[in-house]
Amino acid sequence: MADDAPLSHDASQPIEGEQIYQQHCASCHGIDGEGMPNWQRPNAMGELPAPPHGPEGHTWKHSDAMLYRMVSEGWRDPWNETERLTMPAFEDVLTPAEIRSVINYLKTLWTPEQQRHQAEESEGASFPMQSE
């Protein structure tokens, strides 16, 4: 965890995000964000398992706007052979502030270089402005 890298302009605290992550995300992405085993290889259904959110994964390559969209609307990996959402939508479960908190927590799992890269990706593609 790096304390010197920028997270976002959002005031959400990563501790709240970690609690929400543990409740809603850890069952697929792992308690420590380690992802499912063999996450880079399709399973028997032709779907990629849930990826890790730490440095070894690719979450840090996406902007805040894209990460928010994935959590809010759900996600189907474009490489999957099936058409179903393999990550469910959380827009009816989590508030916009809770979604931002989870994403800000994920940022604490990345290296300083990854945090800087993700901050650059988020310039012009930040969290959507929504009222709570």
Image (cartoon, rainbow, N blue to C red):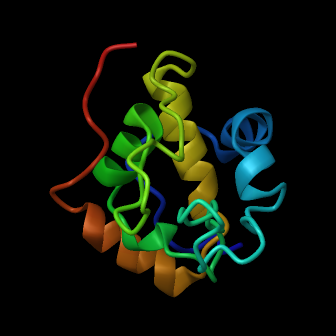
Residue at the far left in the pictured view:
124
What residue is at 64 percent from the left and 68 percent from the top?
43
Foreground residue, 34 or 96? 34
Res. 11 in view: no
User: Residue 108: image x %, image y %?
Assistant: 64, 63
Residue at the far front in the pictured view:
44
Res. 21 in view: yes
Residue 68 position by quadrant: top left
114 sits to left or right of 106:
left
Rendered-image quadrant of the C terminus: top left
Residue at the far right in the pictured view:
31
What residue is at 42 percent from the left and 47 percent from the top?
75
- In this rendering, the answer to whether 104 lies above or below 21 is below
User: Residue 117: image x %, image y %?
Assistant: 37, 79
User: Residue 91: image x %, image y %?
Assistant: 45, 23
What residue is at 73 percent from the left and 62 percent from the top?
33
Rendered-image quadrant of the N terminus: bottom right
- In this rendering, the answer to whether 45 lies above or below 42 is above
Foreground residue, 49 or 29? 49
User: Residue 97: image x %, image y %?
Assistant: 49, 27
38 sits to left or right of 92:
right
Foreground residue, 7 or 84? 84
Q: How many marks?
A: 0
Foreground residue, 91 or 113? 91
What residue is at 79 percent from the left and 45 percent from the top?
27
80 sits to left or right of 48:
left
